[in-house]
Image (tube, grey):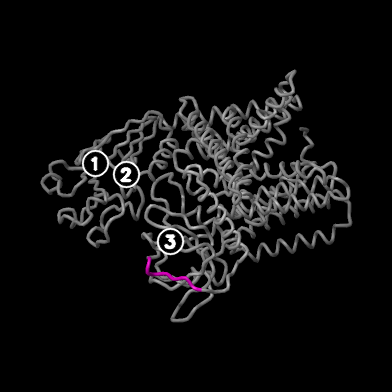
Amino acid sequence: MRMSFLHQIPFFRVLTPFMLGISLNLALQNTGSNTYLLVLIYLLCLLIYVVSKGKTNTKINTLMGVFVQLFLFASGYTLCAYNNDKQKPNHYTHYINDSSSLFYGYVQQIPVEKNKSIKTEIELKQIKINNKWQPASGTVIAYFEKKPNVQMPETGENLVFTGHLQEVQVPLNPHEFDYKNYLRYRNIFHTIYIKDSSWSSIASNQEAWFFSFAQKIRKKLLDVYRGSGLSNKEFALLAALVLGYDDEIDAPTMNAYSHTGTLHVLSVSGLHVGLIYLLLGYLLTFLNQRKTVWLRVFLIISVLWFFVLLSGFSAPAVRAAFMFSFILIGKTLFQQTETANIVLATAFFSLCINPYWLIDVGFQLSYAAVLGIIYLYPFFNNMILFPYVWANKLWALCAVSIAAQVATLPLTLYYFHQFPLLFLVTNLVVIPLSTIIMYGGILLLLFFKIKVISGFLVSATALLIKIMNASALYFDSLPFCMVDGINVSLFTMVGLYVLLVGIFLCIEQRSFVLLMTCTLGSILLVSISIFDDIKTKFQHQCIVYHSNEQAVLSVFSGTNMVLLTDTCNDKRLQSTLRENKIKNNGVKEHLKTMPAMSLIGIGSKKILFAKNTSLLNETLIQALCPDYIWIPAYALKNKKTPAFLIGKNNIILSGKIPDRKSINTFYLTQKKGAFVTEDF
């Protein structure tokens, strides 16, 4: 790595302003209101380019470079603005109202069975308004009523259905996963619940036949796995490895792979596409001649994209296919080409397809890992040299894993707040096993009609899956498997990347100036961490969370966290409680269970909790004089609101409540979000 390495990757200068433009639009959540200004910037940049393209004056070149950067910045900004489907004139959001509507569309995703419904995505084509069908566009998440012995919709099927569109709810708890924002970046804004009697299938010419055809093939391949004799767990993992269908992996298995740093094997990503790429490259080596080399390129790229098609065109698979396609073409055209430049070029074109991918965690992790392997792998690989060939190959695998882990470490800490200590061991075990399982799964799809071969493949694949799952669960059970609860801010994450690049440049260049700069940067990051710790010691916060199933209150005082809850358990709330603990630097956690009625003292404030409204009366309230009365929503289910509670302004109702006008004066977490106070 040299200081002039930026000259070897010109796409870095293209990608950076482009990403900054996208980032600005995402930050401002702009919808294209500055279009005319951006068009003027385009025209100005093009004019300067035409006037100065034949000149070599340094100042002109510098000026041209500045305006090219502005052009790329404006391009990213505008592309992101117009990627919002709501900008389309026939988007369904321009037609819908509060009443139920009649819709026409087709199922574009394989339906997934949930506890009480069947979930899928429907691409809308028409909406009936005033007894007239109007063209419409947009995607909604549909939940079909699940009933026994009732046929569910199939992928690609055309449907006419009625229902009431529900806008996706904003997060109501601090640091809760923003599902609304997540779907917004997929251009999904509403959900709809469709009763069994409210939809029907119709015969029609299929729009977007290619994607529907891909999903139908994917479903048939999944049916091959289902009917092969694999158990539910084995099917779920094999379907995820080969076809990217991870909807049926259970939570304990998912957590085990996450905690051991091997979660990436459970989705079709760069690893899986890379394995297919390597296998094809090896099998087609005989075509690596001057006359047949482009046939080899065509065959490899065709198979890669067919594999992406089978995965349902998942974003990670598409990005990986782009990357390896560009690398293959670049290596074929040019004997000497910078791999990192090709990787950045694929990132640029990927963002041109969907600029929202920039904030996708998978996008960030995959490109960080690849760039880390390109630049850091040689450094780690050359650190140790063994006298045995097999030992050097084993160390090379370790060096790849270390390089990828170091390159993704700041992102991992920022998003997941954990670091897998055993990643080196687990990757050495899981990746080879997952590779063999994936190849076995592909062979099973090819030979599933030949019972002798398919029977052997099913038995061998099932055994390997059991071994891999058992390994992940065993490593996860070890007390030193990972470090959890690490709080890293966005500023610290960026600072860690700057420091990481500086350290390796310093080692490579042996520069005293870089050494001092890295030292000062380290001191700055440590100082920020110390300042945050000091700030934590003086924090005082009380939170009554919004939950439909559980009454939960947490108190943060310094590094202490006291969690008060009833006997119910809301699994969806657990991740939010974990995030709040980490974000508030909670070190010592005290969990206490509240009885049916509790008087909670927090500093100078008193909160009266009642699990049942029948336990409350006016005399008791006057005697205790609580500052707040906390009642969970389920306490009002099928009951009338007690008259002595109506009109009081110190009542907190947590959870989804019945629609009653008499309780509009209360503090409702359903409308205002969690009750948060520092006044105690």
> How far across and how far down the image is residue 637, in percent?
23, 55
Q: Of the residues tagged 1 and 2, which is closer to the observer?
A: 2
Q: Is residue 550 magenta?
A: no
Mark 2, other Cα within 10 Å: few <14 / some 14–19 / many ≥20: many
Is the residue 92 above or below the residue 466 in the image?
below
Q: Residue at x 81, y 45 (%)?
A: 331
Is the residue 422 above or below the residue 462 in the image?
above
Residues tagged 1 and 3 counted as in contact (Cβ below 8 A): no
Q: Is residue 197 magenta?
A: yes
Name the secondary structure under disc 3: strand
Residue receiving disc 2: 544
Q: Which residues are magenta?
A: 196-202
Amino acid residing under circle 3: Glu
Q: Is residue 362 visible?
A: no
Is the residue 191 above or below the residue 510 in the image?
below
Alpha carbon distance from label 2 to label 3: 24 Å
> How far across and how far down the image is residue 504, in percent?
70, 29
Amino acid residing under circle 1: Ile
Residues tagged 1 and 2 counted as in contact (Cβ below 8 A): yes
Q: Quadrant of the C terminus?
A: top left
Amino acid residing under circle 2: Val
Residue receiving disc 1: 607
Residue farthest toward the top in the current orientation of the protein:
387
Q: Residue at x 72, y 54 (%)?
A: 302
Residue receiving disc 3: 167
Q: Residue at x 70, y 53 (%)?
A: 349
In front of the other: 502 or 625: 502
In this image, 610 relative to 547: left or right?
Answer: left
Residue farthest toward the left in the current orientation of the protein:
619
Name the secondary structure under disc 1: strand
Name the secondary structure under disc 2: strand
> How far across and how far down the image is residue 113, in percent?
43, 54
